[in-house]
Image: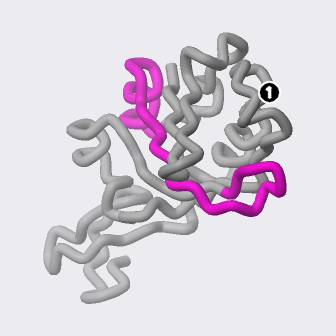
Amino acid sequence: VCHNCKESELNGEYILCPKCKSFNYNLDCEPSFSGEFCSHLEFSLDFDQLGDERLRGFWCDGIDQIPISPTSLSKGKIRKSKKLETKAWLGKSGQEVYSMTIEFGRLALEKYLNDESINDCIPEGNYKNWISVDTVSKNVIVKLK
């Protein structure tokens, strides 16, 4: 049910109401981009493997499951942009706020659009191919399969 106008024909976890165009986030569904996915991604990040001494000892203490723009979770926007922007807590203390861009590869995009888990789209190994960190602008980019 739409939180704004009470329209009852909402069929999805992230959806614009067809009646009033309000964005709705359905907490009853387990969406593809979720706290579970963010935890999997958090524990998959190994900054020591990037070979950059400035990142030695970096770790992640969390990834926000609500993107900077919650409407970016809609399938239409993901299909078009193929990315989400959120924030993560990184650094040697794990407490510095970084902007995080999560780019969807072909498999992640397909699974997201089909309401499937994207946990297995997190690459393993070859960290330089899928993690990029800019400590000056405090930005991290993660590329999913």
**In this image, 141 relative to 70: left or right?**
right
Q: Is residue 21 above or below residue 29?
A: below
Q: Position of residue 20 (x, y in %)?
A: 16, 80
- Between 39 and 118, the one lying in front of the other is 39
Which residue shows up at 75% across the image and 48% down it?
A: 60
- Between 38 and 116, the one lying in front of the other is 38
**In this image, 49 relative to 11: left or right?**
right
The residue beneath circle 1 is 48
Of all residues shown, which one is farthest toward the top? 126
Of all residues shown, which one is farthest toward the bottom? 5
Determine whether the residue tagged by mark 1 lies in a helix, strand or loop.
Answer: helix
Rendered image quadrant of residue 122: top right
Residue extent of the magenta highlight: 89-115
Q: How is the image coloured?
A: one colour
**In this image, 145 relative to 41: left or right?**
left
Q: Position of residue 114 (x, y in %)?
A: 40, 33
The kind of residue tagged 1 is: Asp
- Between 73 and 48, the one lying in front of the other is 48
Rendered image quadrant of residue 4: bottom left
* Quadrant position of the N terminus in the picture: bottom left
User: For the residue carrying disc 1, how many other residues have a C-alpha within 10 Å: few (<14), some (14-19), or many (20+)?
Assistant: some
Q: Is residue 47 above or below residue 2?
A: above
- Between 80 and 141, the one lying in front of the other is 141
Q: Position of residue 16 (x, y in %)?
A: 25, 66
Residue 134 sits inside the magenta stretch: no
Which residue shows up at 66% across the image and 11% down it?
A: 126
Q: How many marks?
A: 1
Which residue shows up at 42% across the image and 33% down it?
A: 103
Q: Position of residue 37 (x, y in %)?
A: 65, 43
**In this image, 14 relative to 96: left or right?**
left
